[in-house]
Amino acid sequence: MQAIVLVGGMGTRLRPLTDTVPKPALTLVDRPFLAYMIEWLAEHGVTEAVLACGFLPDQLREALGDGEHAGVALTYVVEPDRRGTAGAIRYAAESLGDRLEDRFLALNGDVLTDLDLTTLLRAHEDRGARATIGLYPVEDSSVYGLVECHPDGSVLAFTEKTGEAVPGEINAGAYVLERSVLDLIPAGRQFSIEHEVFPRLVGDGLCALRLDGYWMDIGTPERYLQATWDILERRVDTAVRPTAPGMFVGADCALATTSRVGPRAVVSAGCAVEAEATVDASVLLPGCTVGEGARVRGSILGAGAEVAPGAEVLDAMVAENERVAP
Ligand code: GDD
Ligand code: MG
């Protein structure tokens, strides 16, 4: 099975962390965010993934490697200009040439999920659909694609970002597509699958299925942190091995005996937490130092950041290699 993963977004709401690292390459617990997605795809039979990139592809390539990850062969394609979600899918599909299969998966690359793609693929096949959207129920659907379905699974309406905070089943950003869907996408220009393809397919082979499991768009600092605790407290199925529930401590860390770290924390490889310092509900990316008596809470420290002795970092994001003075 082939998959196209859309990773062209800018990650603006995770600045300053995403000033230097594209969101899919940002470390979540112990691996680049996109690694979770590739590992999830592998579990559902994907053997080849095309990563449709827009922003800093070299760093993504560096983070995930050029060959394969978890048994999935990876290729990177960069659109010459911004193509939108459908345009990017078409561009990535074309990069496969004759090797593109009749049926493939397309995914938004900015969610952490363990939804059951195997069931989605089966439903698509059983219904003879042209496109099948995985759905996830939320309390506030306003910033997502809201999908209304007939009991037989056919989509009655697809509305992108209604702006209304009503509960509903939303587009989880996981699609099974028949190759013929690409004919609806014009070549060489910006085109949106949510605004221009799905509405057109309503009544013409567009199906959807609510899936079981965990799903989270990690686009904001709050959700990045929540996803971290969900991984470390095993609310989502991943390959990460927590050091303790809610805790992950990487290799070569120096935690002073009088420091207090946790009950929820990620201390990545090569970090130092000095005497009497406290770190809680926070993520320290690799190589950070928290000085003597300093306090870090509810925060994300970019790689190599340094919190001076006695300084406080509360509910903040600190850029890579930044120094926080007391
Ligand atoms: N390559 C490429 N090129 N990727 C793109 C482009 C592009 O021009 N535009 C967006 N993407 C990628 C983003 O990186 C992201 O992974 C995915 O496509 C979706 O774009 P977002 O900008 O994150 O959209 P959203 O989160 O507001 O809404 C989308 O996701 C929701 C679920 O998280 C929609 O698909 C909604 O319908 C859906 O509910
Ligand atoms: Mg998104």
Image (spheres, rainbow, N blue to C red):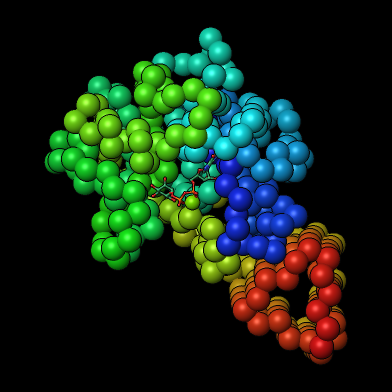
Q: Quadrant of residue 153?
A: top left
Residue drawn where x is 58% and y is 29% of the image? 50
Q: In which quarter of the image is residue 214?
A: bottom left
Using residue 35 as the reference point, say whether residue 193 is left or right of it. Answer: left
Question: Is residue 11 shown to the viewer in this render?
Answer: yes
Expressed as whole percent of the image width and height from the top left, the position of residue 186 reads 44, 24
Using residue 63 as the reference point, say whether residue 220 is left or right of it. Answer: left
Name the outermost residue toward the front.
189
Q: Nearer the viewer, residue 156 or 247?
A: 156
In this rendering, is residue 168 above or below 125?
Answer: below
Of the 4 image quadrants, the one containing the C terminus is bottom right
What count of labels does the image hold?
Answer: 0
Residue drawn where x is 30% and y is 56% of the image? 162
Residue drawn where x is 58% and y is 62% of the image? 13
Q: Which of 230 and 97 is in front in this view?
A: 97
Question: Is residue 70 shown to the viewer in this render?
Answer: no
Q: Nearer the viewer, residue 120 or 261?
A: 120
Residue drawn where x is 71% and y is 28% of the image? 67
Expressed as whole percent of the image width and height from the top left, the position of residue 100 reads 50, 16
